[in-house]
């Protein structure tokens, strides 16, 4: 189980490091308003991760319990989506990385509004929902129970808190804007390898199960 967690965590970690709506929300607030509002945005993003992880773990777990065939379908659907994310990241790596220019957001935010912005950024992003569903599908496909899948949620939220919290600190000092684009291509490469491996293994497991 720990090796499965480790591979899944590596993929989620790479996704969190890579450019996306979460990083853009943290960076834009950090650049214009400083560290405190940016950290509250981070807290909101991590809270949203807990929500999506819980919904996907319990929701998919209930579907699988109701019909075992659902797990086979999830292996193909979730595996295909993870593989798609891996290929997309690989393309970005070969192309030279994603656009890493972040515009400062100077609209004043209280602590509560900053937290709410983080939550909304995560919960209204359909890609985040699909990614967590695909991650849950991978974990279920490895034979883990709904409670084991649910237990992974806080791990993903904690790594998000640490990674985006680091970004909040760096962007509030202006350091990250000068250096992030230099390393973003490597982050995309790690993302491509991790999610590609997860997706391919999940599809392979589905093919093996379908033959039996």
Image: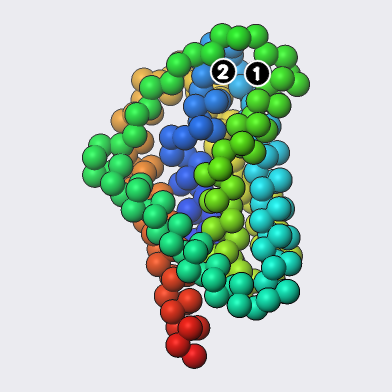
Tell me residue 34's x, y (percent).
Answer: 59, 14
Q: Secondary structure at mark 2?
A: helix
For the view shown, which residue lies furthest in the left direction? Answer: 95
Q: Which mark is residue 63?
A: none
Count up the numbered dots.
Answer: 2
Residue under label 1: 37
Q: Residue at x 49, y 90 (%)?
A: 212
Q: Secondary structure at mark 1?
A: helix
Q: Residue at x 67, y 39 (%)?
A: 48
For residue 56, above or below residue 177: below
Characterize the local packing of mark 2: few (<14), some (14-19) or many (20 or more) Cα atoms within 10 angstroms.
Answer: many
Observer able to see residue 121:
yes
Q: Residue at x 65, y 25 (%)?
A: 117
The reply to whether discs 1 and 2 touch (Cβ–Cβ < 8 Å) is yes
Q: Nearer the viewer, residue 178 or 111?
A: 111
The numbered mark, 1 or 2, whose residue comes first in the sequence reads 2
Quarter holding the N terminus is bottom right
Residue under label 2: 29
Tell me residue 76's x, y (percent).
Answer: 48, 69
Tell me residue 108's x, y (percent).
Answer: 65, 9
């Amino acid at each position: 189980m720990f090796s499965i967690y480790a591979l899944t965590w590596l993929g989620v970690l790479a996704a969190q490091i890579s450019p996306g709506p979460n990083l853009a929300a943290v960076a834009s607030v950090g650049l214009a308003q400083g560290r405190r509002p940016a950290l509250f945005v981070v807290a909101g993003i991590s809270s949203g991760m807990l929500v999506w992880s819980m919904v996907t773990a319990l929701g998919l777990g209930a579907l699988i319990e109701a019909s075992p065939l659902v797990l086979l379908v999830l292996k193909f659907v979730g595996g295909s989506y993870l593989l798609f994310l891996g290929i997309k990241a690989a393309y970005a790596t070969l192309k030279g990385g994603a656009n890493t220019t972040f515009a400062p957001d100077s609209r004043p935010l209280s602590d509560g509004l900053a937290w709410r912005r983080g939550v909304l950024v995560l919960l209204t992003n359909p890609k985040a929902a699909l990614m967590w569903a695909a991650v849950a599908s991978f974990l279920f496909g490895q034979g883990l129970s709904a409670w084991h899948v649910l237990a992974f949620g806080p791990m993903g939220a904690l790594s998000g808190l640490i990674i985006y919290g680091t970004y909040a600190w760096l962007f509030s000092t202006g350091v990250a804007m000068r250096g992030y684009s230099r390393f973003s291509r490597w982050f995309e490469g790690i993302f491509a390898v991790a999610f590609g491996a997860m997706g391919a293994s999940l599809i392979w497991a589905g093919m093996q199960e379908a033959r039996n």
